[in-house]
């Protein structure tokens, strides 16, 4: 759930770059790496607070349920 938006965006950008490379017959390695790196950095900056909040909320709720799992 947390990594999904970033992974989907990287998948879409990689697919678009691959189609562009096939259409133009340009086989440059940095052409596929740089856009994915840029979109990843942008999305981590944009969605970073939400991602941290989601993970923190999950960890907090996990730790709070430990006493109820222990029995007695």
Image (cartoon, helix red, strand yellow):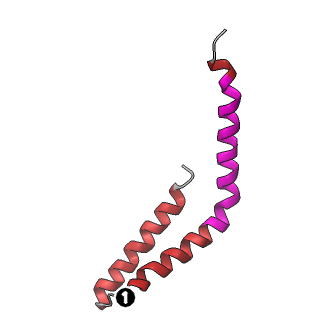
Q: Which residue is mark 1?
A: 28
Q: Is residue 40 above or below residue 56?
A: below
Residue found at x 55% / y 70%? 40
Say which of 30 and 44 sits in front. Answer: 30
Residue bounds of the magenta highlight: 44-66
Residue 63 picture quarter? top right
Give residue 25's position: percent from left, percent from top: 28, 90
User: Label 1 crowding class (10 Å Cα cut-off): few <14, some 14-19, many 20+?
Assistant: few
Give residue 12's position: percent from left, percent from top: 43, 69
Say which of 17 and 41 sits in front. Answer: 41
In the picture as drawn, the residue positioned furthest to the top comes out as 72
Give residue 67's position: percent from left, percent from top: 69, 21
* Position of residue 21 in the picture relative to residue 13 (left or right): left
The kind of secondary structure element at disc 1 is loop
Q: Is residue 52 above or below residue 8?
A: above
Q: Is residue 24 above or below residue 37?
A: below
* Position of residue 39 in the picture relative to residue 51 (left or right): left
Q: Is residue 56 covered in magenta? A: yes
Residue found at x 49% / y 81%? 34
Q: Is residue 71 covered in magenta? A: no
* Position of residue 25 in the picture relative to residue 2 (left or right): left
Residue found at x 32% / y 87%? 27
Principal secondary structure, stretch drawn in magenta: helix
């Amino acid at each position: 759930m947390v990594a999904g938006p970033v992974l989907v965006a990287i998948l879409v950008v990689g697919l678009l770059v691959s189609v562009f490379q096939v259409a133009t017959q340009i086989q440059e390695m940095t052409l596929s790496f740089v856009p994915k790196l840029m979109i990843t950095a942008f999305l981590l900056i944009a969605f970073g607070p939400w991602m941290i909040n989601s993970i923190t909320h999950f960890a907090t709720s996990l730790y709070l349920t430990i006493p109820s799992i222990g029995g007695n």
